[in-house]
Image (spheres, rainbow, N blue to C red):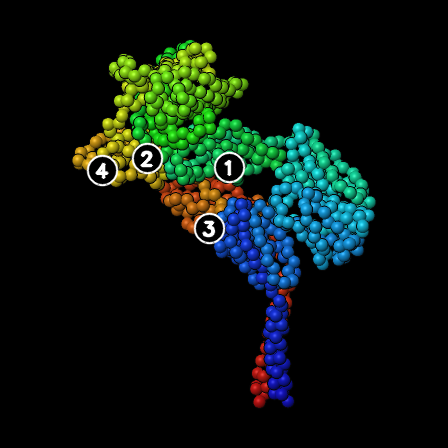
Amino acid sequence: MIRNKAYFLVFLLLITIFSIPLTSAEDSDEQLYTLSGKVFDADGQLANKTSIKVDSMTSTWSENGSYVFSGITPGEHTVRAYFMNSGHTVVYRRMIFDSDMELDWQVGKNWITVEAFDNQGIHIQDSSNFNIEIVGVEENNDLEDGRVEYGPLNIGEYFTIIANYENFESSQFLHFKMSASQPNDFNFQHGMNSRYGFVVDEQGFPMSGVSISNGTKNAVTNSDGFFLIQNLEVGTIQTFTIQQSGIDIIDPVVTTIIDGEGWMNLSSTYQVELPRNVSFITQFQTIPMSPFEIDWEGGPYTDFYSLYLDGELAYRGTSTTFSFNPQDSGTFEFRIEATNINGSNDNASSLLLIVLPNSSDSELWSLGMSWDYEIEYTPSSPYNIHNVTITAIGTESTIDAFGHEKTSFLARYSDEHDIEGEESYRWVDSQNLLTLHTYWVDSPSSSSYYQEGILGWDFTDSNGLSTDIFSSQDEELNLHFNRTNIIGVPGHPNGYDDTYNTVSIVEDVILTTPAGTFSTTHITITDNDDGVISWELWYNASVRNWVKIIDQLPGSHSDKKVSILKSFDVPMNPMFLTEESNLSVNEYSITWAPFQGTDYYQLFENDILIYEGNQTNQNISNQKDGNYDYQINSIMLSGYTVLGEKINLNIFHIAQPPVFLTTSQVLNSNDEIILSWTPITDAEWYNVTVIDRDGNKNSIYNGSENYSLIDDLSIGQNRIRVQVGLTNDKISDFSSSIFITIEENESNNSIQNLAYPAVIILILIILVTSVIYRNRWSE
């Protein structure tokens, strides 16, 4: 009898076991749908690699502008498109799946999705009793299962939605800014309305990060100062508090919710703190075409910095350094601003970097050529005579004062009276050797003043045809001259010149200067209005430059400037383009000018050969602190060695901390995250520390990889930073922080549902085994 009971229990157990997969199989028969379509960039062309994701499912990537995402369950889902190679932009939208669907995405566009409910909270099915209008959008769509959508429309624009109920007897308004980072999904319920508006300070500037709350509903203003609170019951009296950083900035606002427009614009007289000044530590300089660190210094009340390169955003974040990796030679202008929730503080002094080309094929000038002038000003400067050296260091394309693109020589302008950090450069027209662009910046130890000039020289012959002073056959030309001087000195006005002139050219004029006696081309430029000779210039082909210049329109600080050639140097030996300097990096480039007739070059560092070849630059990596003497030699095709120039560099390396690639985010307690950061050359170890919400500080990773899997962070906000130790024993400061917030999980029903039958099965197995064992024992 006992044996029969045991067999019966085994039979029961088998039925239970096999019934569970049958139930799962039935569940797996649920219909799954597919989303497909195309992705386009902002210009309407097929976009490059783009990621499509539905909820938290694994992403799928587009191929040749098309994508297919399979395995979508019926119901409501949030779908995301991430245009990785088209501006790193993202678009989110809400979708209801009850069949396979097609959807095309475009950079800068998103949809409006609406759900409509009656006063009982039930979906409105009949469009005759409900009407949606998007102001300014000629699109009229009918409800389907209580839902309707519009678009795609431009992201970043503001739209007004009007919902009319029951033959327009009541209306609900909603105003919002089209978002990319979240679905523009709205619920309209009969008997409800919205409140929205802009919050500005006493000067009329938008206030971002302001909280508007009625105690149950809350909104925070965006960067425009705009807020939106939805679904407030019509007829109720609402009291709104307006706070920033927990401080009341406006007295509470009491209002009655009614039908119609819901504007509630607010103005604050509360004094808010803008971020303090931010300024570049890196100074104006020329650099080789290789990575270069730009550093700046900020002040209190700063949340983040924005670095702009030629008007385009290059970096935004909390770091005070940026690695600039130029791909082309030329002149690059950087601008920096500091931002907090109250606004931004833009530093007016930009940073100008000149990236030198690798080589020059110019005809008149070659890299390394230099000219020494003695310059006298009227009225006299405090130094009386200035001894100035002009050195050719590259070629660039430049826009002159008339908007014409010109090929120019880039020249370094060095005055013997310059103090450390003072810099001056000239861009010289490669056809006529007249200056097109000037730039001077004072030493940071003295001031932040600068001066910039943009010039234009438009020559025409007697027939009115465009010409140039060295190519024209006429002995008399016409010149339209234009110049704008930008004076970066507080309170100092900018200057402007615009004149029409007659140009006289006389050949074979003999002129003697401290540099020798020369046969010159004498050029006289006379103002047509007053008959004053504005310029006299004497050119010599051997010098390949001006032997003498008398300039009677020199600028804002003098009435006359006379430049006389003392000496010139068409390099007879190899010349460095890299200047002697103090460097705080251990990676840099040594660059020299091409030397005609060279078979290959030899570069020596402290009398040790470190490079041999036909390149004109050498990158130095992992350099130890100290003084380094460099010499460049040319080995000629004949085998003869030409000894070149020597320079000294003083190196004191400051280790820079890594920058997190992982961003701040919110996770569930059972989630894990891979922290990653930029790799640092010659890193021996990285140390990652965390400070939890209770202020406890711990090291959560110490190793040589630039990433780590983290799965045991504390509940709440965790502040995480990383530092690096180098093989030369230098240790960086800690990096800027990221914040990982861990939230407690709600119970996972699906896991419980699986765990529960598993426990039952285990109990049954134990019981059956026990019975069978006792039965056998009794036998």
Separation of residues labelled 4 and 3 (CA atoms): 46 Å
Which corner quadrant of the image does residue 589 belong to?
Answer: top left
Badge 4: few (under 14), some or many (20 or more) residues near its Cα, within 10 Å? some
* Residue drawn at the location 29% of the way across and 14% of the way down: 509
Q: CA distance from mark 2 to mark 3?
A: 40 Å
Question: Which one is in front, 404 or 703?
Answer: 404
Dot 4 or dot 3: first in sequence order is 4
Q: Residues within 10 Å of mark 3 (few under 14, many from 20)?
A: some
Q: Residue at x 58, y 53 (%)?
A: 104
Instruction: Check disc 3 and report the residue beneath it.
Output: 707
- Residue type at mark 3: give it: Tyr
Reading the image, the residue beneath label 1 is: 312
C-alpha separation, residue under disc 4 versus residue under disc 1: 42 Å
Q: Hey, what amino acid is under mark 2? A: Ser
The answer, for residue 36, to whether it is visible in the render is yes
Query: Badge 2 is on which residue?
Result: 359
